[in-house]
Amino acid sequence: MNTFLEILESRLLAALTRAGIEQPAGFPVKVVAASDVRHGDYQANTAMALAKRLKMNPRELATQVIEALDVDDIAELEIAGPGFINFRIKPAAWSQKVGQMINDSRLGVGVVADPQNIVVDFSAPNVAKPMHVGHIRSTIIGDSLSRISRFLGHNVTTDNHIGDWGTQFGMVIYGWKNLIDIAAIEADPLQELLRLYRAVNLLCKEDEPIKDQCRDELVKLQNGDVENFAIWEKCVEVSKVGLNKIYDRLDVSFDHWLGESFYNKELEPLVKALETAGLARESDGALCVFSGEELPPKQDPFKEKRDGEWSDFPMIVRKGDGAFNYATTDIATVDYRLKQWNADKIWYVVDARQSLHFQQLFDVSKRLGCKADLEHVSFGTILGKDGKPLKTRDGDLPQLADVLDDAVKSARAVLEEKSGHLPELEKEELAKMIGLGSVKFTELSHHRSSDYIFDLEKMVALQGDTAPYLQYSFVRVCAIFRKLDEEISFDADGIQISDEGEINLARALTQFGEVLPTVLDGLKPNILSNYLLDLAKAFHSFFEACPVLKSEGEVRKSRLVLCELTGRVLQQGLGLLGIQVPERM
């Protein structure tokens, strides 16, 4: 099922050929949705762009194009301004498109012609610690991009590259041996591990011999000590149990959990390969990768300016004490994903503050022969109402479980006020659906690079650009069908779209197949979020202007089909954002 955009672009390209208008190599023939529907539904500036290259009058060229353009079956044409070509879709074409959508399980969304093998690396918390509010963005953005990419037909592999190896384990193992509360580790393992880490960290600051003992415990672990390795395994095991409780609440899952430790055996051979290839050399006792000297210093991630002069800023791949670091592990991770998963694209959904690390990682990987498209899907910061990074009164990052609990409580308070008549169990489930949906939608309705204020009162409101507003829109659709006495046949027979409110809703519905693929242009889920808000607004305007249940015959059926499609698109679209919809609230 082709979208109107695809049809119009194909017809426009054919018209240029038919009119004998030569197109420069690589010249894009683009049609876009009109920004102001008073002038039409779609618009093309092809004639203007071509006229400039061909040194012709743009309106004259647009006239030639229109005379050769065969769209009488779907649109009316006009030339606007200096040479824009406007397309106004005919009511019969809207009717036909809606009829096609109601019979299409994909709701007008095509499958990509060239599926890619995409690896999405997201969430990636450190083990032995509870997830905090800072993990919201990576987890939710990564999950939505994975869902959308799969729906569009790509082969997606998700990997939770957890931090399960590193210096913190010296302190955790020391704490396990000397300070552990057995009852606490069984009741709430992540909280107890966090308590151990904080307690030992404090002791290390006060007592140098304890700091040395922690370092010894880490060395023993790295050298394969049986007791320490068993403690480490237990830490990872109980951590995964705690992390999965959060992921289950968020309805997030992964194909793999290949943490840093998975690559330990690959690091020594990797470093030797870097040396052999001449990519790494010793510097002050450490082994480092330096600049390839192919970029201007200002664009080179291996250069930094000191005292007005450009100096080397290498990537350390083996420290002076012989230990490897997460940079070494990340290089090995790229290599594994290329060889084992045949990755065409690897997306790292990680805080923007890691930008320099990823620039260096991608540069080294390319020098090692990586042909895949590597992308850092960066994001900004979650702020409190004071406009500063969100923290607790103690100055710590709020734990994610607490944030989700607060969202559910806020949603429950709104439900008590608006839907107090519902059964208790239903209100409890609704509060979870609305609260968690609100957290996700707030994240995904903002451009990922922007910071945003975490305001639960606004997030769970039924009015405004919120998840509850969209969920309520779906509920309103369900309520229409609960009032029906007769069975409705959802097919294309007799569909007539002619009223302005019907056309506005049909326009919004048919744009689902046009908008969704563009989410992957720049990896911006907020494009889908904004589309769903526009669809909901179009539906509410339609509902107010076009009586549904009081209408009759083909008008009644057509309007019920529009309602049904609205419900389906809202449910599908929100599902791709990882948000569930209730049937009543």
Image (cartoon, helix red, strand yellow):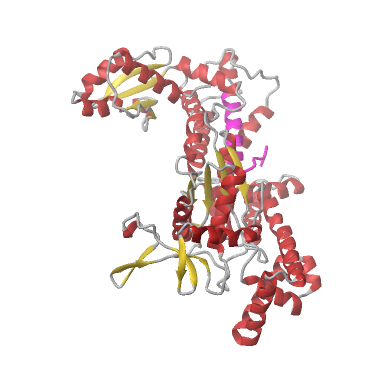
Is residue 2 visible to us here? Answer: yes
Residue 95 x %, y %:
51, 17
Q: Residue at x 25, y 17 (%)?
A: 63
Choose between 160 and 455: the one closer to the eye.
160
Q: Which residues fall within the magenta stretch?
A: 562-585
Q: Main secondary structure of the magenta part?
A: helix
Count of marks placed on residues: 0
Query: Is the C terminus in the top left, top right, bottom left or bottom right quadrant?
Result: top right
Left/right placement of residue 312 relative to residue 334 reads left
Residue 491 x %, y %:
62, 17
Q: Residue at x 26, y 29 (%)?
A: 49
Q: Is residue 346 above or below residue 502?
A: below
Q: Quadrant of residue 325?
A: bottom right
Is residue 387 visible to us here? Answer: no
Choose between 265 and 344: the one closer to the eye.
265
Q: Is residue 189 above or below residue 373?
A: below
Residue 568 is one of the magenta-drawn residues: yes
Left/right placement of residue 252 relative to residue 137 reads right
Residue 345 x %, y %:
52, 43
Residue 525 is one of the magenta-drawn residues: no
Seen from this angle, which residue lies furthest front? 276
Choose between 133 and 302: the one closer to the eye.
302
Choose between 513 and 275: the one closer to the eye.
275
Residue 448 x %, y %:
48, 50
Q: Is residue 410 above or below residue 13?
A: below
Q: Quadrant of residue 469?
A: top right
